[in-house]
Image: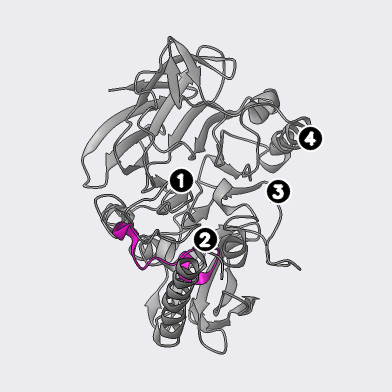
Amino acid sequence: MRKGLIPKLAVRSAVASVALVAFAGLANAADERWVQYSSNGLEVRVATAAAACPTARVDGRNVALSVRSTPGPDFPVRICAATLPAGTRSASIEGAALPLPKARPDKILLIGDTGCRISTIQVQSCNDPKQWPFAEGSAKAADTKPDLVIHLGDFHYRERACPLADRGCKGSPYGDNWAVWMADFFEPARSLLQAAPWVMVRGNHEECQRGGKGWSRALDPYPFKSANGCLGLGQPFTVDLGGVTLAILDTATAGELRARPNETARFRKQFESLERLAPTGPIWLAFHRPIWSVAASFLGIAVGGNASLAAASSAIPARTDMILSGHLHTFQILDFADDLPVQVVSGHGGNELHLTASNSPAGLTVQGAKIRSGKGASGVFGYAILERKADGGWSIANRSFDGKLVSSCELVGRRIACK
């Protein structure tokens, strides 16, 4: 037997035991239930270990949920779904009320990059709520009573086994399986999932070679039809926010360091399609990788943003006022000297923070765009809240997970004023 094989087998055996225990417990576990926007409108979804999908009660009548995905290797649950008609007044499953949307959501919570990282080179202390505060933070965020939650991508981070020498993540499952999706997202997010409908944005950690199978089965906004268990990149779809159209794009694979011609062409075509998908009124975009963001700066030179998306950005409709993204593990909001949409980054939802991200980015140039003004808050876990004002404008507040206000800005078209 080769040297070092016994310890490796021991690790695999221990992890397998953890997964088996987690899977065995599913038979007695409560179903996971949530409401999200999809390409077909508003859907209720359920993850269940039961042999059949449940029935929802919608406006006084029974609505049977259909099977979205059946149990399979590493996923011993079936995902069930049903479309909720526009204007639904009440909906419940087994007596538990489901959150329903407001025609004009006034309070929108932004959160992103929430999972706990266990990779080859980085290990986060998943068992320490100070080091991975997503569970406590999402419960506090639910207390704000948002009308809508937008998760800006990167749900799944436990890609490798916890090292034997590291007790900060002892007992954690790993890989693209249901045990990890429960640990990284569904269990810690449960109270926030019950608080409001969600928009789910795919991140690069939900690419097919990473957490894409769990994403495709449970959260992808398109129907689950896949021979290999993972859906490809999705097309844009829209959500009516009452006076604003939110367009959701899948930028999970967009190349950052250099523009990839095939990707630039794809995103240019998608940006151009927004004129048809949102023919009137202001537009907001939601996608994971920000076009413009400052991950770090050296001697006045900014590092960050996405080259492929920047090369396609001239096709963004002029009615687009704001872009909502994650990916950079911080909060950042930027407006630009040129007539470009405001870029918001809310990626400080639980994963290890990017401490090099600029807090005072004004005057820097990133991906060819000069930053007119901006605000950052590196080193603070939290979320952002967009709130509609009486005059029809919007404000955005960056809050830490203990509810403290870190910074706030007023938004007027493509301009911000922060304090």
- Compared to residue 107, the image places residue 413 above or below, namely above
Residue ID at (39%, 47%):
351
Q: Which residue is mark 3?
A: 235
Kind of residue sitting beneath label 4:
Asn
Q: Which residue is mark 2?
A: 36
Percent coordinates x, y for residue 407 in the rendering: 28, 30
Q: CA distance from mark 4 to mark 1?
A: 31 Å
Q: Residues within 10 Å of mark 1 (few under 14, many from 20)?
A: few
Percent coordinates x, y for residue 184 in the rendering: 42, 60
Kind of residue sitting beneath label 3:
Gln
- The quadrant of the rendering that contains the N terminus is bottom right
Mark closer to the chain start, 3 or 2: 2
Q: Which residue occupies the foreground of this view, 143 or 297?
A: 297
Residue 367 visible (yes or no): yes
Foreground disc of the pair 4, 1: 1
Image mark for residue 262: 4
- Compared to residue 337, the image places residue 170 above or below, namely below
Foreground disc of the pair 3, 1: 1
Q: Which residue is mark 1?
A: 121
Residue ID at (52%, 67%):
5
Residue 116 quadrant: bottom left
Q: Which residues are magenta?
A: 165-181
Foreground disc of the pair 2, 1: 1
Residue ID at (60%, 28%):
319
Mark closer to the chain start, 3 or 4: 3
- Compared to residue 257, the image places residue 266 above or below, namely below
Q: CA distance from mark 3 to mark 2?
A: 17 Å
Residue 254 quadrant: top right
Q: Is residue 302 magenta?
A: no
